Amino acid sequence: MEKLLEPFQYPFMVQAMIVGVAVGAVCAVLSCYLVLKGWSLMGDAISHAVLPGIVIAYAFGIPLSVGAFTSGLFCAVATGYIKANSRVKEDTVMGVVFTGLFAFGLVLFTKIKSDLHLDHILFGNILGLARGDLRDTLIVGGLTLAIILVLRRDLLLFCFDPGHARTIGLRTDLLYYLLLSLLALTIVVSLKAVGIILVIAMLVTPGCIANLLTDRFNRMLWIATASAVFSTLFGVYVSFFFDAASGACIVLTQTALFLAALLFAPKQGLLLRRSGTPAVLELPALPDGNRMGAQPAAKKSSCPNG
């Protein structure tokens, strides 16, 4: 028993679990909206695009989080602008923009002398966060989560049916850029903990797990958060005994949960599927007081429900 409780005797392990839970909860809630909107690749694009902002911020003595947020938001805005003013599809634009920015960041990183470690930027360093980083992560993460929850109904309607959102008077253009800003802010919050690469999984996998296990959006939020929190605690815990990267262990745990849901979900599991009827995602009451009829979730989600 003493051996099993050994990780909790080290303050850096406890701090890693606290930071991981905060980051995981924010990513999980936002993940549900990204899955519903079909923006999984957008999280990938912004997470890679923050690298040049980090290097430039370091060169000019600016806080790295400011540079990362600015660079990520620039990627999102540039993608939307090019898509709106050309015949190129959004996923293609994202592929070009984020790879270009990521390559630019790598070139800057090799040319500007710094004490930044590329491994920490790419994969995070959740076990080595300073106390100031812990404070900043909790504050910014809490603020981001609060904004998402306050505007959850408007964001839900925008993700599910932008046309209806415009009809009832919602500013869909503002919601578009707000969601992109929240995505960029979430990536910045997660950057020091799990890095550029692993944050992609944390922004996609919890929503996919929840999407397979329930057809109600409110319940989807809770399941996604629970899976992210469990994956974080378990991943950090087992990384102590295996002497492995904590961020990678967190993502591997999420992947294992996703595979379990894919196989054994009560209605949509590949092994337990009861019928060939397409799954539907039931939404809560809309901002105008009406209730939208259920629509096939597979049409609005990047994660198939079967």
Image: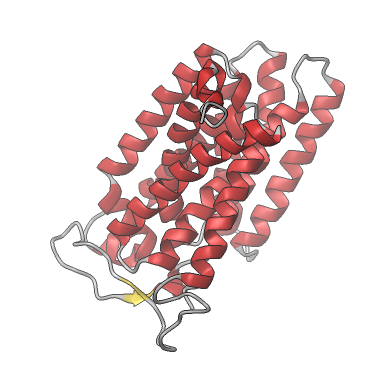
Q: Is residue 147 above or below residue 298?
A: above
Q: Is residue 9 above or below residue 185?
A: above
Name the spot of residue 190 as percent of width and height, x first. 54, 33
Q: Residue furthest right?
A: 111
Residue 92 visible somewhere in the drawing: yes
Name the spot of residue 163 as percent of width and height, x first. 33, 66
Q: Is residue 304 above or below residue 239?
A: below
Q: Is residue 293 left or right of residue 248?
A: left
Residue 78 visible somewhere in the drawing: no
Q: Is residue 303 above or below residue 203?
A: below
275, 51: nearer the viewer:
275
Q: Residue furthest left?
A: 289
Q: Residue furthest front?
A: 1
Q: How is the image coloured?
A: secondary structure
271, 79: nearer the viewer:
271
Name the spot of residue 194 as percent of width and height, x first. 61, 34
Name the spot of residue 136 as percent of width and height, x first. 46, 19
Q: Residue at x 29, y 43 (%)?
A: 149
Q: Is residue 218 left or right of residue 276?
A: left
Q: Residue at x 60, y 27 (%)?
A: 126
Q: Residue at x 55, y 44 (%)?
A: 77
Q: Residue at x 52, y 78 (%)?
A: 270
Count of marks overlaid on the render? 0
300, 277: nearer the viewer:
277
